[in-house]
Amino acid sequence: MKLDSIRAIANAVLYEGYILYPYRPSSIKNRQRWTFGGVFPKAFDQQGDASRMETQVLLRGGEQAAFKVHFRFLQVMTREVGQLTTPAQELPEEDEPALTRVPSLHVDGRELLAWEEAIEREIVIGPLRPADVQVAASVTPFCFKGAREFEPVRDRSGRIVAALIRTSQTIEGVVEAKAEMLSPDVWRLTIGIENVTPLSGAVRDERARAQLRAFTSTHAILTVKDGAFVSLLDPPDDLREAAGQCRNVGAFPVLVGGRDNSAMLSSPIILYDHPAIAPESPGDLFDGTEIDEILTLRILAMTDAEKREMASVDARARALLERTHALTAEDMARLHGVMRNHQSQASEFEPPPMGGDHEKLRLVSLLETGRSLCVGARVRLRPKSGGDIMDIVLKDKIAVVEAIERDFEDRIHVAVTLVDDPGRDLGAAGFPGHRFFFSQEEIEPIAVGDGP
């Protein structure tokens, strides 16, 4: 399969938690970032911060099978704000400009903020045949040199009055790959990445400074030609024991892409086999555990000042803000009420035909008071005491009965939609969020003409 087809999933893992709602540096949660897939320098000996990530997977394939490994991670890069002591037409080419570092600065309506950005890194090894790394592991060292860059910031007159200072540290690591034959056509692959960046005494004792030399959101994409990977979540019976013996440190390998099982994603986040990006999602929100619709509405509800701060974070935050404001009504509708099965495919749910209440009136139950209850009837909600917050909110609301259902324990549940709910049609079609269930004792039929 083509690597590009699974890049979207891998990128979602790469940028998970990069910035979270409310998408502003002033938020506490955005001061505590880089929480997934951290591989710290080996010299940084702190409990809970690993210096190595290791993955073991099973591969079916003969002598012609060949695999590749793409290790990917983010390297944290600091962005500081410097105010020039004296405005200038150009920055000096060799020496650093004379400036004062400040946490934030306003330049003609533009807000400059100190922040931590990220650089995407990738190390590729292979293709390798398992037999070639059976006796001795393939060892690939790598190094990314540190750098410092100054981005000039000009005022309306064209003078440089400030600079954004981006600094990255030198990082070093080693990638290893080894194979063990379990049977003539089954191999156990072991791949690992280790951070061997040297540290000085001061950095060794300070986690925030060690973080700048760590690998963040580390994960690996494995692909194979003339072979197939084996699911560790649902292995075939003949490999169930071997799958259970695979050792993974800080990684959770799952099948990705097509059903030919030619690719795996070793993720620092627990996923299921064949994860997918929801086709309705308009773009990355950096929080795959949230609901796009909720985050989108929250962004739109932010104040102008909050949006200005969000736009000042970096290019990714600005793109998210601009994309959210560009959504049409149709785009928003696609985010609402999608039902899926466990394989992340759209359900085959067919909503009942819509029509007037008179078209679906039929007697389906009888209340103890002797009054009949039927689909289409209007009722007043009387939740029992001790209910949850939703019961409290819906108390005394007028609703319409959409269905009366009996569960496996022979209990009756009445499904209703609220008369004053703008999304009542969605509830009538069976979608959650606009459809509520109550017992017979919690609803009170009302006569025609009563209520709103």
Image (tube, rainbow, N blue to C red):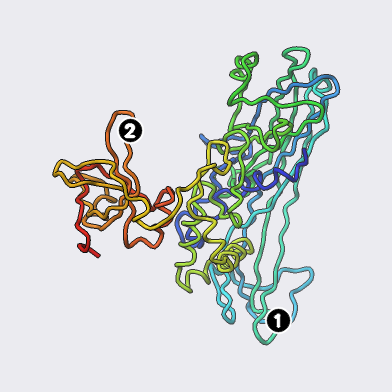
Q: Is residue 128 visible?
A: yes
Left or right of 240 on screen, residue 338: left
Give the residue furthest to the left.
369
Q: x%, y% of residue 407?
A: 33, 33
Residue at the spot of label 2:
407
Task: Please determine whether, in this image, residue 151 is positioned above or below residue 230.
Answer: below
Depth check, front residue: 290 or 148: 290
Considering the numbered disc 2 on the image, is that residue within a helix, a strand or a loop?
Answer: loop
> Which residue is found at the position 78% from the left and 31% from the top?
224
The amino acid sitting under disc 1 is Ala
User: How far apart are labels 2 and 1 at the CA level?
Assistant: 76 Å
- Residue 176 shows which numbered tag? none
Residue 251 visible in the shown view: no
Closer to the camera, 72 or 95? Answer: 72
What residue do we see at 31% from left, 50% from top? Answer: 401
Circle 1 Cα neighbour tier, 10 Å, few/some/many (<14 / 14–19 / ≥20): some
x and y percent of residue 11 in the render? Answer: 65, 48
Drawn side of residue 322 relative to residue 181, left or right: left
Mark 2 vs mark 1: in front: 2
Q: In this view, does 240 lie above or below 307?
A: above
Disc 2 crowd, CA 10 A, few/some/many (<14, 14-19, 20+): few
Q: Name the residue under label 1.
A: 88
Question: Do labels 2 and 1 touch, CB within 8 Å?
Answer: no
Residue 215: image location, x then y, percent: 64, 43
Q: Is residue 450 left or right of residue 232?
A: left
Q: In the rendered view, would you say 29 is above or below 302?
A: above
Q: In terms of secondary structure, where does tag 1 sit?
A: strand
Q: The residue under label 2 is which amino acid type?
A: Asp
Q: Quadrant of residue 384?
A: top left
Residue 231 position by quadrant: top right
Farthest residue, direction bottom: 157
